[in-house]
Amino acid sequence: MSLIQQNDLTEPAIGKRQIVRHTADTLRRRILAAPAGEQIGSLQTLARELEVGIVTVQQAARILEHEGLLEVRRGPGGGYYGRRPQMADLERMLGAYLCGEPGSWREILDITSLLFNRLCAAAARCDDQALHRELLDLRSQIDACDSMDGLGQLEGRLQDILFKMVSQPLFELLTRVALGSARDVEREGARADMFDLSIWRHGRLRIIDAIADRDPALAHFEADRQNRQVLAALCAFDRV
């Protein structure tokens, strides 16, 4: 049995987790210091250079794979290659964190409200005519919507258009995670029935009109007004 394999068997269980985290931190720094797609080493090489066991490197690699920072290639020319996480990777990780550290429904709504207000105001500054036409087409569909299920689908399209109008990746990431968490909590808490479809629909129409008029202050105001209606409905629901 090699020394590297022996290290894996003799490391204490409690210290093992710390070693894995430290190894992952070291590998993460290597990856971010090198161009994306560059090989950072093989399993055996990394274990030897970091003076840890093979299993430790494998466990650290799984952490980095989940973060979207590492690709493990097998066969000829295989090894560990650095990469950069995509939006979906980051959204998944932040979403998982919120699931593991759930905040209150009210706290999630507060975060969502602030981000959505800013999103609507920023979208009102967009000058892309094609996106404005797409938004107005969606407006007519929202105006004709007569079911919560249908409005939920249109809401997703509205957010996609707004994100394209804003084009700020980090802002989009944070907003998508917050909105997704709010929807999850809403479903788990069975709070969908507390919203009036007509009020929700007309609130969205006012927001779209303000964006179409390229009025950031009004768009922020209308978004904030509808968010306050949601919070008021929540308070009434909780008192029942």
Image (tube, helix red, strand yellow):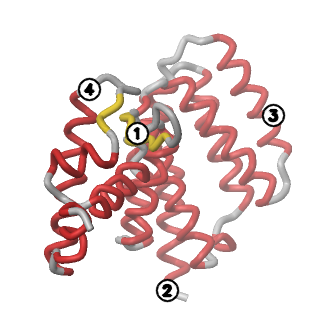
Provide residue 116's location: percent of width, then percent of height.
47, 44
When asked about the image quadrant of residue 63, the answer is: bottom left
Q: Please rate how many residues cluster around mark 3, counting C-alpha atoms within 10 Å: few if below 14, some from 14 to 19, many from 20.
A: few
Q: Which residue in the protein does label 2 denote?
A: 239
What amino acid does circle 4 point to?
A: Ala
Camera-near label (4 vs 2) is 4
Q: Amino acid at mark 2?
A: Arg
Amino acid type of the residue tagged 1 in the rendering: Gly
Question: Around disc 4, counting alpha carbons within 10 Å, would you say few (fewer than 14), some (14 to 19), or many (20 or more)?
Answer: few
Q: Which mark is residue 140?
A: 3
Q: Secondary structure at mark 2?
A: helix
Disc nearest the viewer among 1 and 2: 1
Question: Which sits in the foreground, 36 or 104?
Answer: 36
**Judging from the image, what secondary structure is the residue with disc 1 in?**
strand
> In the current view of this chain or complex, which residue is farthest to the front?
1
Up-down: is 159 above or below 177? above
| Image quadrant containing the N terminus | bottom left
Question: Is residue 112 found left or right of 213 in the rendered image?
Answer: left
What percent of the width, then of the height, locates residue 182? 51, 62
User: Does residue 15 appear to the left or right of 150 in the view shown?
Assistant: left
Residue 79 - label: 1
Please state if 124 lies on the left or on the right of 138 as rendered: left
Q: CA distance from mark 4 to mark 2?
A: 56 Å
